[in-house]
Image (cartoon, grey):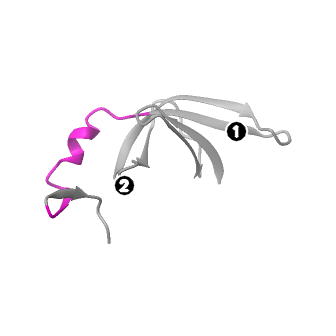
Amino acid sequence: MIDIEIQNETHQTNERLKFAVVPRIGEGVRLQNPNGFWASYDVLDLWYQKADYGEVWVPFLHVRKTEGEEELAGSPLAVKDQGEVVPFTI
């Protein structure tokens, strides 16, 4: 697994996630929003920086929410609980 630092332009957050492969520029990734919903994000930029430890290069992704994702959050496919849209749970 590869640790990748993700800089989210939409929510102005940074987080580190594990991936099996490094996504390329222009590809999409699915990430969980702060509100618990999953959404599609476009990879805008990818670069590598040398880590503080050893001869290791850490990948960084710059992502932004895919256009049209906001409309899907209010779609009838979402489960409603007492009038509020909530993430799908099992």
Identify the residue shown where x is 30% and y is 32%.
Answer: 67
Q: Nearer the viewer, mark 1 or mark 2?
A: 2
Whole-number angstrom distance, CA of label 1 to CA of label 2: 27 Å
Q: Amino acid at mark 2?
A: Gly
Whole-percent x and y of residue 28?
42, 39
Circle on res. 77: none
Residue 67 magenta-highlighted? yes
**Up/down of 56 relative to 47, above or below:** below
Image quadrant holding the N terminus, namely bottom right
- Residue ranking furthest to the bottom: 90
**Up/down of 66 relative to 86, above or below:** above
Residue 55 magenta-highlighted? no
Residues shaded magenta: 64-82
Toward the viewer: 27 or 17? 17
Q: Residues within 10 Å of mark 1 (few under 14, many from 20)?
A: some
Query: Left of 76 or right of it: where is 2?
Result: right
Q: Which residue is mark 2?
A: 36
Identify the residue shown where x is 22% and y is 44%.
Answer: 72
Toward the viewer: 13 or 67? 13
Quadrant assignment, res 6: top right
Q: Secondary structure at mark 1?
A: strand
Q: Amino acid at mark 1?
A: Val
Q: Which residue is mark 1?
A: 58
Query: Left of 35 or right of it: where is 7?
Result: right
Whole-percent x and y of residue 76?
13, 53
